[in-house]
Structure formats: C-alpha cells, structure tokens
Image (cartoon, rainbow, N blue to C red):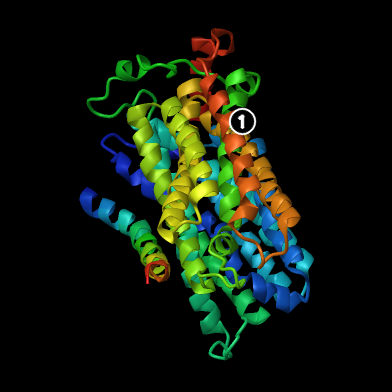
Amino acid sequence: MSLLDREHTIAPPGFNRWLIPPAALAVHLSIGQAYASSVYKTALVTHFDVSLTQIGVIFSIAIVMLGLSAAVMGTWVDRSGPRKAMFVSALFWSSGFLIGSLGIFSNQLWLVYLGYGFIGGIGLGIGYISPVSTLIKWFPDRPGLATGMAIMGFGGGALIASPVSTGLLSFYDPNSGVTGWVASGDAVGKLFLTLGLVYLAFMMFGAFTIRVPAIGWKPAGFDPATVKVKALVTSNHVSAASAIKTRQFWLVWIVLFCNVTAGIGILEQAAPMIQDFFRQPDGQSMVTAAVAGGFVGLLSIANMGGRFVWSSLSDVTGRKNIYMIYLGVGMALYLLLALVGSSTTVVYVTLAFIIISFYGGGFATAPAYLRDLFGTFQVGAIHGRLLTAWAAAGIAGPLIVNGFLDAQGAPGELTAAAYQPALLTMVGLLVVGFIANLLVRPVHTTFHEPPTSRSEDLKITAEV
Amino acid sequence: MKKAQLAVVWALVGIPLLYGVIQTMAKAAALFN
C-alpha cells in the first residue's frame, strides 16, 4: 500500500500542476453518474416489481451516505492524501456497482440498497472531497478556478453516463427496438457490471495521476502576500475540529443549505414544472414530454457550467461577493419566475438556466470560501463536514416543493399559479442565506492553530 | 514529452465530457424547434 501513501505522491521539481485538474475530473466525472440513475429507474421498478419510491430509496441512501462519509472521513482523507483517498473511493464506487448487479441478477433489492446505495455512497463521499484540498494547494492563486474545474465534473458525469447508459441498455437488451420498450433486469445488471469496471479503471487513472505539492512549493511568480491582503482571506489555519465551533462555519453551512435547497427544488421538479407552467385551459401543455426532457438536459449544462464559470469568477470578485450574487440576484430571479415565468418559454428557460447555474456555482465555490476563512490545513475535512448541508437540503428542497404542490392539486393538472407559494418560499430561504452570508466575518484568532504545532502536523502528514 | 502527457491526460477527461455535452445539447435542441 506504500505506493498510495502521501510521501509517494509528492511531485518532483518541475511537475506541471495542470495535470492535477484532469486527475480530479476523472474521479468527479465517475461519481457524477449518481445523477443519471433516472435512465434505469423504470427498468428496476419493472424488474423488482416494486414502487418508484422503493427504487428511489437506492439514490436517497447513496446521497445520505455521501454526506455522512464526507463528514466522517474528511479528516482521514486530509491525513492520508489524495491518492489513497481516490483509490479507496474507486474501490467503494466500483464495488457498489458490482454488488448492485449481483442484486439485480439474483432479484434481491436489498443487495442493490447495500451495494449502490450504502457502499457506493461511501465511495461518492470520499471521492467528492478527495481532490479538493490538493487542488487548493496546487492553485493558491486561483482556488476558485481549480475547485470549479473538479466539481464541474460531478455535474458533467451525468451528461456522459446518461447517453452511454441508454446506449448500453439497448445493446444488452435484444428487445430494445420494440415500441414502449423498458430495459430488462438482465440488461441493467450487465450495465452495472460494465459501469463498475469502467469507473474502476477511470478512477484509478485519476488516483495514479494525482500528486501533492512539496512543502513550501508555490507557483512561479506567485506572491502569497497578494492573497493575504484580501478581506476575509486568512494566512492562518483552523483545524476541522475547531472550525465546526466557529460561527463562520455555520453561517456558510446556512448559505450552502439555502442555495442548494432552492436549486434542488427546481431541479427535482424540472420536467413536470415546465409543462405545468405552459398548461393551456384545455388541460394540455404547450410543452411536450420530449421538449421537457431537453429542458432537463439544458439545466444539467447550466449546473455544470455554473460550477466552472462562477467559481472561477469568485477568484476575482471574492467569495463573499459571489455568494451575494448567487443569493441576491437569485432572489430576484425566483421572484420573476414566480410572477412572469409563464409569459413565454424563452423567459422561463432563461430564468431557470441562470438560477441553476447559481446552484452549481454555490457548490463549486464553497471549498474556496472555506480555504479563505480557515486556511488550507484541513480544508478537505472542513468541506466534508459542510456537505451535511447538501444532505439536509436534499431532503428539505423536494419536501417544500412537493408539499406545496400536493396542496395545490394533482400532478398533470397543475398550472404556473400552483408553483407560486413554493417559489416565494424559496425567495424567503434565499433572504435567510443572504443575511447569513452578510454576517460572515474573519475567524477569531483563538481558533487559529499555533504556527509551530501546525508545522509539526503538516510535517507528520507529509511523512506518514 | 511533458506537453504530450498533458494533452493525453486532458483528452482522457475532455473527450468524454465533450461527448456528453454534445449529446445533451442535441436533446436540448428540441426546446428551440
């Protein structure tokens, strides 16, 4: 296992730091498959002869495990280094698929829960945070750009997995040409086997490409003093254990929670929502199911693009200011969506596109915000703990939207007006997030690690 | 050699990502028809 240890991943002099983002992307593009599970959802419902909710539980377990494992394993990831973390993540993620395929072939749903949901979910959590701290250390001059590139992969993974999975299901199922075709369980099992092996290879490529910078390394021409003079950017360091005792951590937690809850509410309901917004008096929607599917695809691009574009821009604007935009402009956009979103499809699509780009941007900018506030010492572990906000938002967002919609009428009969209470609630949430962001101040010096002990920690970390 | 390595590594992640974006854009084109 020594090949995986941090000391074997220290980059030699002259190493090109631009090799690091693709290594991180290899992991995030793989685990981003989690958002493409709708491709085989109906096939699993038919195969196991269970409800959609029972199949949806697979994805829910995976996301809960993502949040939990990122929070619990964050310190281990920071201590062990990115290669070991990516390696372990690859084993978990791949095993999840292989055990899941066994469950499908043997008709045992609990094995899919255990495999893809529980074990795969641990791979998701470790994989998500594994390259973050390393990227920030390689790109002290552009941390937003660096984390944006990697976390963009989590949005992009579904864009790849969705068409590839559809193609593979057709390839594995001899009945794929039949009208109203739903893939067989056998085809989904084979798809899981294929994805498990391909993702294992792809993530291993990332694990064995990644390197950590040598202690004291800095990019050519980079003057750390230029970073230090920016407001809210510390040159000190706070441990993960201390960070969660600070007001700043919980304010950023609220910011992320509010931003994600608002975005997830729209994302989860995207296809029926656009149809409902343009429902005619005769009950028919102007927007067909195919067009609604295209809209969902467009939102995936907004989600991915926002992660890269807005996070990169945060290097120029500063993290606090960019969250002011996500939340402040976001409020105005949600309000417009509620009031004039049904006027034309162009207005609706434009508003939703920008809103979801802010949702993605919020995810990708968070690690750089944490680095500004708490330093680089245990930023991966702190980020892992922050991701519990995502898990909480994943429950709250759909609950809010579905709760309001259930009270307004039955699916297939709703109109734009039915969405107003939910959208206005999201505006209120964004106000809360906006205020929380306004209250973020530099972390008090009492939470800073003593310079000597931190140096020792870093030395030990590097020598393990 | 270093530039070639960089190109290969970026191609390994860039080509699948580009494929995904093109496929999604093609699907999204239905919105504007």
- A296 vs A446, left or right, is left
| Nearest to the observer: residue A247 or residue B14 | A247
Label 1 sits on a secondary structure element that is helix
Residue B23 to residue A340: above or below: below
Residue A431: x, y in percent?
Answer: 57, 31
Residue holding disc 1: A254
Residue depicted at 52% across the width and 75% down the height: A166
Residue depicted at 31% across the width and 59% down the height: B11
| Residue A376 makes an appearance in the image | yes
Residue depicted at 47% across the width and 31% down the height: A323
Residue A445 to residue A378: above or below: above
Q: Examine the image and state in which quarter residue A229 appears.
A: top left
Residue A443: x, y in percent?
Answer: 54, 15
Q: Residues within 10 Å of mark 1 (few under 14, many from 20)?
A: many
Residue A183: x, y in percent?
Answer: 61, 81
Residue A355: x, y in percent?
Answer: 47, 46
| Nearest to the observer: residue A366 or residue A121 | A366
Q: Chain of mark 1?
A: A
Amino acid type, callout 1: Ile
The residue lying furthest to the top in this view is: A446
Residue depicted at 49% across the width and 21% down the height: A373
Give the total number of marks visible in the rendering: 1
| Residue A210 makes an appearance in the image | no
